[in-house]
Image: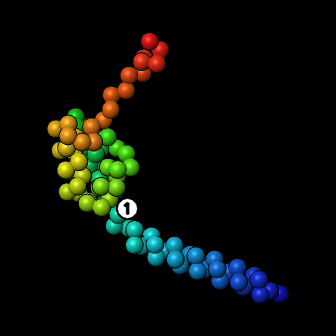
Amino acid sequence: MVTGLELAVLAVAVLFLLVGIRVLQALRPFIVNAVVGLLVFLVAGWFGFPVEVNWLTVLVVAIGGLPAAVLVVLLSTFGLAFVPALVDLAAPFL
């Protein structure tokens, strides 16, 4: 026999599922932009234009899309922003 508590838990679960689906639909363009931007960074790295990939670059590309990815690559190429840091692994041992 189904109790009132079980029905309430089921209703809350369905509500969370519906809200989650709406949120993912709203975020889909940003997710697609971020993935396309990361692909642009990967291709730029293959051609010798490395870009620092961190939360800020992904956020800029997620909001700005492909033009923002190209701008980030250009800024990194000219050394103005998003330049990868050179890490000296021997420094702690000197």
Q: Secondary structure at mark 1?
A: helix
Question: Residue at the location (29% across, 55% down)?
Answer: 61
Q: Is residue 81 above or below residue 89?
A: below
Quarter of the rendering occupied by the N terminus: bottom right
Q: Label 1: few (<14), some or many (≥20) within 10 Å?
A: some
Residue at the limit of the structure toward the right, as seen here: 1
Question: Residue at the location (32% across, 40% down)?
Answer: 52
Q: Residue 90 at what x, y percent from top left?
A: 42, 17
Quickly name the residue at label 1: 31
Question: Residue at the location (38% across, 49% down)?
Answer: 55
Q: Amino acid at mark 1?
A: Ile
Q: Is residue 39 above or below residue 13?
A: above
> Residue 3 appears in which quarter of the rendering?
bottom right
Relative side of 57 to 7, left or right: left
Relative side of 75 to 16, left or right: left
Q: Residue 66 at what x, y percent from top left?
A: 23, 57
In this rendering, does residue 47 appear at all? no
> Residue 29 appears in which quarter of the rendering?
bottom left
In this rendering, does residue 42 appear at all? yes
Q: Residue 16 at what x, y percent from top left?
A: 58, 76
Quarter of the rendering occupied by the C terminus: top left
Q: Residue 2 at what x, y percent from top left?
A: 79, 86
Relative side of 24 to 4, left or right: left
Question: Residue at the location (32% across, 49% down)?
Answer: 57
> Residue 10 appears in which quarter of the rendering?
bottom right
